[in-house]
Image (cartoon, helix red, strand yellow):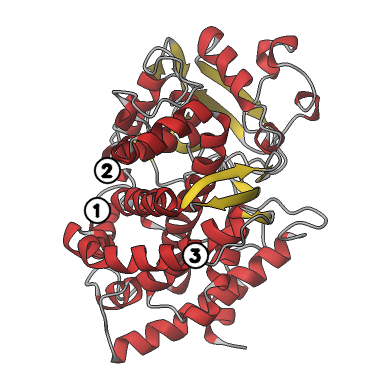
Amino acid sequence: MSEVQKTAKNAEALPPRPGAGFFDDGLEHKSAYDLPLEKLNPINPRLWSEHQWQECFERLRAEDPVHFNETEIAGRYWSLTRYEDIKKVDADHHNFSSAHGITLGFPVGTELPEGALKTTTFIAQDPPEHDVQRKTVTGVVAPSNLATMESLIRQRTIDVLESLPEGETFDWVDKVSIELTTLMLASLFDFPLEDRRKLTFWSDIVFAIPQPGGIIESEEERRDGLLECLEYFSGLWQERLKNPGSDLVSMLAHGEDTKNMQPMHYLGNLLLLIVGGNDTTRNSMSGSVYGMNKFPDQYQKLKANPSLIPKMVAELIRWQTPLAYMRRTANNDCEIGGKQIKKDDQILMWYASGNRDDAVFDNANDIDIERPNSRQHLSFGFGIHRCMGNRLAELQLKILWEEILARFDNIVVQAEPKRTLSSFVNGYTHLPVQVFRKQ
């Protein structure tokens, strides 16, 4: 048995994946307006995989913007659905903690079940631990480093786009979105390129809901996959102790505040960086192609004026909202929107809903690549937990669309996409398209 396996053998359990065991099957095929208000529960992953979540949030924003649910598994939790409430809580780390987790889980103080892994990550910590650990790795996305990476990102983007078949239907998610984000992740970790699809698998299983024929079919499969991730990266850690570079593993291995991390803490931070660098950008890449097809007038406007690409990138990130929510936990009894929140209540900040709030964004369900306030979107969060890789994500999307417009007359979606069964990752698993090159 390896040291990693010995460490994990008696590890505590993680809370269940987002949505696992929480959804009400009665929501699957009904309008949100046909149900009693108290029955609305946006954590239902089928609302997301079936792309029915907008109506649920539309009603909650109008009738119950601070919405209460309680289940035997999760206990008490509140859904914030209006932009201003979400922003206020997200920016207040003193009163609303991240230390109990960033996704819906067991109530604070609950004894967790045996068998799964308990990881720790800096996004699920409060200051000062959060600040020093985040600072250790932020250099990899510093402006100077982004400038250095830009030419590599562009060349890889060109290579991928040039390899696409013309006049044949293919999966944009696999051929473009996954490939580009996985290549970028491999560079950030100095990870062997031949094994880069392992990063995609490890990212996907973090929040996957076990189901027959799914990415994983049991919690045991998730555990085995995550231990494989830890085993692999523990080898890279040992290599970088001897031969440090400018990659994320070297930064963690030599950082004053991270070099003595326990294995489960190392795994947690790895998974945070992998998911943050993979799911968000990958699903924005797919969402941008789908969105431009849903709003062809905006696609034509973009083709006529490529200088709008930076505005389009911000608008697509708002419209897509690749991570649907983040959780906080109340440190004290308090009031939000006239509702009495109890200490230790879980609070779900629904970024996807706030980004569709018509009080902030006119015609919020539409894509408008000239929207004047698109950069005020919630997708990257606010306060100390604002996404540290936001500029890198924007750069990747900007380069992708510059190179798309340079060589393609059109990218045409052939059928509705298949979507991720998750209320946390608002993503795509399959997007069939055809490309038509410029003559």
- What residue is disc 1 on? 131
Q: Residue furthest front?
A: 439
Residue at the image position 54 percent from the left and 67 percent from the top:
163
Whether residues under marks 1 and 2 lie with C-beta atoms below 8 angstroms apart, the answer is yes
Residue at (46% x, 86% y) in the render: 235
167 or 120: nearer the eye?
A: 167
Which numbered disc flags the more N-terminal residue, 1 or 3? 1
Q: Residue 398 placed where, x, y %? A: 35, 48
What amino acid type is highlighted by mark number 2?
Ile
Q: CA distance from mark 1 to mark 3?
A: 42 Å
Of all residues shown, which one is farthest toward the right?
212
Which comes before the other along the chain, label 1 or label 2? 1
Task: Kindly identify which residue carries mark 2.
Answer: 384
Where is 259 relative to 347, above or below? below
Residue at disc 1, secondary structure: helix
CB within 8 Å, label 1 to label 3: no
Relative horizontal placement of residue 237, taking residue 258 as reference (left or right):
right
Lower sequence index among marks 3 and 2: 3
| Residue ID for mark 3 | 162
* Circle nearer the viewer, 3 or 2: 3
